[in-house]
């Protein structure tokens, strides 16, 4: 049962209420749970499919994962997690980048 951290930004109150019911809110929008099972974490991750605004980052200890972390992001701004030499990096399009305009 790995330690799980969830960070929210500008999400609807129902997400914050749900997270607050199963996790400790350490700071506004930041939640932690030291013993969240993979099954419960899967149900938590499944609830973000209808996110209408804001963003959510979920990370947990994953010994077999790159950098020892499992990581999922939802919402805006869009981020792409890439791996390089077993490390995790976040890639975002820059506002002036031509690829972002497409």
Image (cartoon, grey):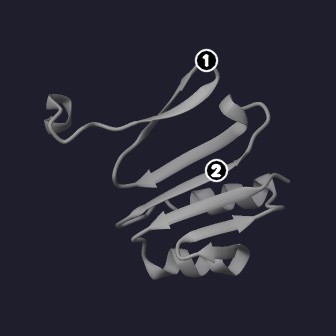
The 10 Å Cα crowd at callout 1, few under 14, some 14 to 19, many 20 or more, is: few
Above/below status of 63 relative to 35: above
Left or right for 84, reference 25: left
Left or right for 48, reference 43: left
Q: Quadrant of the N terminus?
A: bottom right
For this orientation, the residue located farthest to the front is 27
- Number of numbered callouts drawn: 2
Asked whether 38 or 69 is in front, the reply is 69
The 10 Å Cα crowd at callout 2, few under 14, some 14 to 19, many 20 or more, is: some
Left or right for 64, reference 100: right
For image coordinates 15% across by 35% down, the residue present is 102
Label pair 1/2, CB-CB below 8 angstroms: no
Q: Which numbered dot is residue 85?
A: 1
For image coordinates 68% across by 40% down, the residue present is 69
Quadrant hosting residue 31: bottom right
Q: Which numbered dot is residue 48?
A: none
Provide the secondary structure element on which disc 1 rests.
loop
Does residue 50 appear in this view? yes
Spatial CA span between label 1 and label 2: 19 Å
Indicate the position of residue 47 as horizontal and vertical percent values.
Answer: 56, 64
Q: Which numbered dot is residue 59?
A: 2
Above/below status of 35 relative to 90: below
Quadrant hosting residue 75: bottom left
Provide the secondary structure element on which disc 2 rests.
strand
Indicate the position of residue 5 as horizontal and vertical percent values.
Answer: 66, 59
Indicate the position of residue 18 as horizontal and vertical percent values.
Answer: 61, 77
């Amino acid at each position: 049962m790995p330690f799980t951290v969830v960070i929210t930004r500008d999400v609807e109150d129902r997400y914050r209420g749900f997270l607050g019911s199963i996790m400790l809110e350490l700071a506004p929008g930041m939640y932690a749970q030291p013993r969240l099972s993979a099954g419960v974490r899967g149900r938590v991750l499944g609830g973000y499919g209808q996110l209408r605004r804001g963003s959510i980052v979920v990370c947990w200890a994953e010994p077999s994962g790159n950098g020892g972390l499992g990581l999922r992001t939802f919402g805006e701004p869009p981020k792409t997690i890439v791996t390089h030499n077993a490390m995790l990096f976040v890639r975002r399009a820059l506002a002036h980048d031509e690829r972002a305009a497409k």
